[in-house]
Structures are given as structure tokens and as C-alpha cells.
Image (cartoon, rainbow, N blue to C red):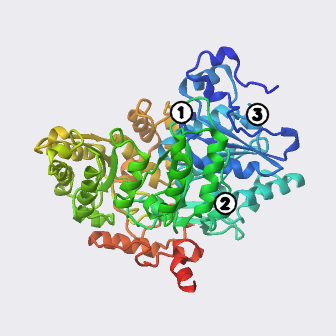
Amino acid sequence: MRKQALPDRVLLRVEKPARYLGNEINTVHKDRHMTDVRFAMCFPDVYEIGMSHLGIQIICEQLNRRADTWCERVYSPWPDLSAIMKEEGIPLFALESQDPVKDFDFLGFTLQFELCYTNILQVLDLAGIPVYAKDRTEADPLVVGGGPCTYNPEPVAPFFDLFLIGESENEMDALVDLYAQEKKKGTGREAFLRLAASLPGVYVPSLYEVSYNEDGTLASFAPKYPDVPAEVRRQICTDLSAAPYPEKPLVPYIKVTQDRVVLEIQRGCIRGCRFCQAGTVYRPLRERPEKKLEEYARCMIDSTGYEEMSLSSLSSSDYRFLPELMDYLIRNFHENHVNVSLPSLRIDNFSLDVMKKVQDIRKSSLTFAPEAGTQRLRDVINKGLTEEDILGGAGKAFQGGWNRVKLYFMLGQPTETEEDRKGIAHLAQKICDVYYDIPKEERNGKCEINVSTSFFVPKPFTPFQWAPMYRKEDYLAFAKTVKTEIRAMKNQKSIRYNWHDSAGSVLEGVLARGDRKVAKAIAKAYELGALFDAWSDFFHPEIWDKAFRETGVDPEFYNLRERSTEELLPWDFIDIGVSRRFLEQEWEKAQRAEITPNCREKCSGCGAARFGCGVCTEKRGEEEA
């Protein structure tokens, strides 16, 4: 009988005990005595969020296919349980076996969002693993990081033994193979890390030295030993048809954020929005074969019983076989009451036709992401979307029966002016006008326009990585401008407006572009009580303000200044495939509001063609055919 890490008396004291029981449908159980390597994979947020993350399920699928490895899951305990575990000395455990995480060979973290960094320290703390890598011994697991935030791992580098830079499908098996081999030899921790540093895509922070200039900027970043690579190259999966995929996804016993089957149709994007890190670091666009997706869809629905399926992609409309795939999904699943959702669609005739078939028009809304209120600023960010596109798409949607539209924008982008901010309200008004130009008898009730603004955060490996941010007071003033302008619109009652938290965005900016010095502020913030910072109910900016003061870390140094393209950046040792020169050219073009065509219109020579796959080889393949 499987043991239970938490006694009933503890489970009765916490919210949603099912978060900690494991044993969900399709859970993988193995004999711990028959496996050589035990891997605990952690999403540092609450169970409902972590269970919705496809990446962890892919990693678990990949590792559990191995006879010598058992990969289990870990999530951040909610504050109620976290307090009890600390009070009673209960060690953090993995869900499948309920064994203490400290007994595992690896503890892996996926770093999806900077505001989860204090949760990483919570997991280490509750597991009884020293927070700083330098303090760990042979008895501790190797702490591994992966995910999009590792494109600048430096703010959390002191907490990790190693990072996997890129997509795990290529790196994970090689790392585990090496570990299994060296474990049998009795190789020690430091020696193993030295060997691991030679694997493609592996970054071991302890093997690099960092120095700073008097002004606080980075002076040098170099390996300590000649056999350690000076540059770490991002690894990607060039053939998604052969990549592991969870055909039997886990089915939780409580409702999670994305309670549905997820079908990843492609990886990457052709659009080249200059603010978007994912659009750069996942280049080139790679598609999964339509027939493979049909096979996955059937397996996942049969093995889970889910009644909803979502297509996952940065820009679903750019998947070349979308019409054929949607025809298959509608034909085979919709009549059986399986709903299919399509996020990230560009609104055109095909998309609207499909959505009519799979959505209840009276209950659903359409989403547009203009990101900027004027055409000039949309050109600066290379959105590739004109006002004609937006109004034309809205008109088609309204004529198709929709009356609710969500509009997403960013405030505080490079070169942004007061006119650009007011333009958000004016664009919302123009969309209202399109609706009310339709004869009254053909409308579907009152028009509802929901405008939402987030605050721009520059990210590494984007053309905007050199851009300054603003203070939180400035962001709030920008939002007030939009709000005031919306109130002046003739259809103001049809337009609702909300904006994101400015203090959280400012902190995200520090953590996104920080260096190793920021780690001490993260540790201090956790010590002072920071936890679940991504949740507005738990985020306390005053804790972070105190942590920055006490550690001598100046957040304005990381946020308010514009970087020179000559400056050495903390993440420059990573080679993502896209060249620095290309990013510099895009930064220069942004100042001129000059558009760059998408990858299918024209190759811009970004450097991703060296991977020899995806959209970079499409035209060559067509010519050869």
C-alpha cells in the first residue's frame, strides 16, 4: 500500500487536500528499487497552475519512458500547508511516491515567470536542501533549471547547480545518461558538474567567474577552466514528429486552470514582434505533422475522457494545415460534445467560420491583441497588424453574430507618446462604431468592448532588451490617461477598462534583466516573507523594497537606464541561434518605426536557419519538390 506523506490531521487543516495526494488518473508508478535515477520535476506555483503546464508533462513522459528513471512531480505548497510543514518539520515530498524530495537524484524546476522565484526558495527550504548551491553536499539532489526564464539565469544562478538552455527533448536524456553512468562509478558532485558542463546546452554557474565595473555594469564573464565552454548554445528539437508527447495526460481530481486536453500544433512563431521573447527564443517555427496531431488527439481524448481540447501555439493561424486539422477535429469530436478552442487566431474568414462551428457565439468573445493604440507604435513593435486589419476583422465578427471583443494592449513601450496612449481609447471607439454601423435588427444585443493593458517589461534576447522601463507611478499615470480618454468616448458605456499591477511589472523587470547580484535580494525577500508573488493577494511590494534596501541592490539601475549596444549583458554568454547583430538591427529599425516582414514573406537573416529545420527550410523543400 502506498504511504501518505501528510497525516489525515494535516490534510483536514488545509484548503484542497487533493493538491497533495497524487495518484491522479494516468499517474506513472514505478518500483523505486528498480530505478537507478530518481527525478523530481517541480513547477514552483500552486498545483492548479502547475498541472496546467504542458512542458512538465512532456518531461515526465520523456523520462518515464526510460526503464532506469522515475520522474515524479512537485508543486509549491499553498501558504496554509507551507506553514504547517515548517512548524512540524514535515519534509517536502513528490506526489507519486510521497517520498521526500531530498532523497532524489535531481530536483528540476521549470522557470516560467520571474515572480515565481521566491517559490523556488520555498521548495528548497521545505525540502531541506540548502538554498545556495555552494552549500550543498553529496547528500543533496542536483538542482536543475529550465524554461524561458533561463535565457537570463543569472538572478537565480547561485541557487542552481546547472541549467538546461533550450528545449528539454534534446538535453534531458544526455544529462540522465551521464549521471547514471557516473553514479555507478561513484563520481562526486563537483566532478560530475564539470563533466556535465561539456554537454550541449548545459550551463553550470559555479564554473564561471563574474566581475563588475565601478558603475555596476558587467565587466567580464568567463569560464574558470579551459575545458568549460565560454558560450552555451541553446538546444532545440528539430523534428517535433519524433519528440515525446503525453498521449495519456494526467487527469486531476480537482479543477485546474486549464482543465482540458492540450494539443501543441507547432513551436515558434514567424511574426517577429519586437517585445516578444518567445518569438525569438523559440525560432524557427516548427510544425507538428497533421496526421500525428490527429493521432495524439484521439489517444488523449480516449485516455482522459475530457470534453474540451485546446490547440496550443504562439500563433495558431500560421499553422499551414489548420483547415485540415480543424475539419478532422470537428468531424470526429464535436458531435461527441468535445469542444475545441483555438487561442491565438488572427481574425479572418476561415477563423470566423471555424469558430462559429466550435463556439457558442452568444457566450463567447473574440480576442484581438493590437498591443498599441496607433499605427506608428504598432510599426515600432513590428506587430504586423494595421488598423484596417483590426476593424475589418471586427466587422466580420460582428456580422457573424459576435458582440463581445477583448482588446489587449501594452503601456510604456519604446518611443511611446501620450498620443499613442490616447489612441487605445480611440481604437476601441472605432470598433464600437463598426458594430453600431450594422443595422439594429442584425445586431446581437449591446456591444461590449473589454480593454486590458499590461505594462511593458523588456526581456533578454529581444530587440527591446536595451530599452528602459518606467517607475510604477509613471505606469499608473499612463493607465489614467487611457481611462480618462475612454470616459470621453461617445460609447464609453460599451467600453470597460482594466490594467495590470504596476509594482509587479517593475519587479519583473528587475528579475528579468538582473545579474547575479540580484540573487541576494531574492533570498532576502523570501526571508522577509515574500511568497507567491505572482498572486496579487500575496504580493507585497514593501517586502521587496525592504529586501532591495537591505542588500544594497538598486532596482532602478536595472530598470530605468537604456543599455548601450556595446554593454556586456548578463545573458550574452548564451547563444540562442538568433544573432546579436540581428537584434541590434531590429532595435535600430524600431527607432525608425520600420517593419520587418514575417518569416514566410521574406527571410531576414536572423541566424535561426543554422538549425536546418522548420520554416527556414520550407521554401527550399518546396523548390526541391
Identify the mark at residue 97; answer none if there is no mark: 3
Q: Tell me the residue at 52%/76% (across/down).
A: 616
| Camera sees residue 224 | yes
Q: Which mark is residue 169?
A: none
Q: Identify the residue at horizontal 69%, vertical 24% (top origin).
A: 90
Does residue 201 sit above or below 117 in this rendering?
A: below
Q: Quadrant of the C terminus?
A: bottom right
Residue drawn at x 20%, y 53% is 427
Residue 410: x, y in percent?
Answer: 31, 52
Q: Are circles 3 and 2 on residues that touch, CB within 8 Å? A: no
Residue 205 in view in this figure: no
Q: Nearer the viewer, residue 164 or 522?
A: 164
**Sequence order check: which comes first, mark 3 or mark 2?**
3
Identify which amino acid the numbered label 2 is placed on. Answer: Ala
Q: Is residue 435 left or right of residue 30?
A: left
Determine the secondary structure under disc 2.
loop
Rate crowding at label 2 as few (under 14), some (14 to 19) or many (20 or more) other CA atoms within 10 Å: few
Task: Name the mark on residue 527.
Answer: 1
Q: Tell me the tag on residue 243.
A: 2
